[in-house]
Image (cartoon, helix red, strand yellow):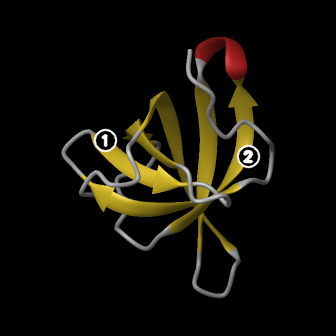
Amino acid sequence: MEDYPKRKYALLTVIAVQESSIQVTDADGTPYHVRCVPRQAELLRPGDVVIVNQATPAESLTVVERLTTRGQRDGCQYELSDYRLASKAEPA
């Protein structure tokens, strides 16, 4: 299992969105490809920032919530799993 953001309240920024996965970066700029399952119908978009609400290292799963541009939680939650480190030189 690769290391991934597992601290509660860690912030992740969405860099790119594919069909069933997204690319995010953590506060250190480390990029990850992750599987994203929305708990609501609204999908994440590049530039969205999410905050970690719950991390389950045994399952490599984090539950995150999207933040508004003012830094407030907006209620839209997502399950992120299958974290894979992405190359910093890799296109988004």
Other-residue count near label 1 (Cα within 10 Å), few / some / many at <14 / 14–19 / ≥20: some
Q: Amino acid at mark 1?
A: Ser
2 or 10: which is nearer to us? 2
Number of marks drawn = 2
Split into 4 quadrants, where in the image is the C terminus?
bottom left
As drawn, the residue found furthest toward the right would be: 8
Other-residue count near label 2 (Cα within 10 Å), few / some / many at <14 / 14–19 / ≥20: some
Q: CA distance from mark 1 to mark 2?
A: 19 Å
23 or 38: which is nearer to us? 23
Q: Amino acid at mark 2?
A: Asn
Q: Which residue is mark 1?
A: 21
Secondary element at image label 1: strand
Whole-percent x, y for residue 45 in the image: 34, 67
Q: Which residue is mark 2?
A: 53
Query: Which image quadrant for residue 21?
Result: top left
Split into 4 quadrants, where in the image is the N terminus?
top right
Whole-percent x, y for residue 78 in the image: 51, 45
Secondary element at image label 2: strand
90 or 35: which is nearer to us? 90
Q: Residue at x 67, y 40 (%)?
A: 5
56 or 29: which is nearer to us? 29
Q: Is residue 15 left or right of residue 52?
A: left
Whole-percent x, y for residue 10 in the image: 74, 53
Q: Residue at x 41, y 37 (%)?
A: 34
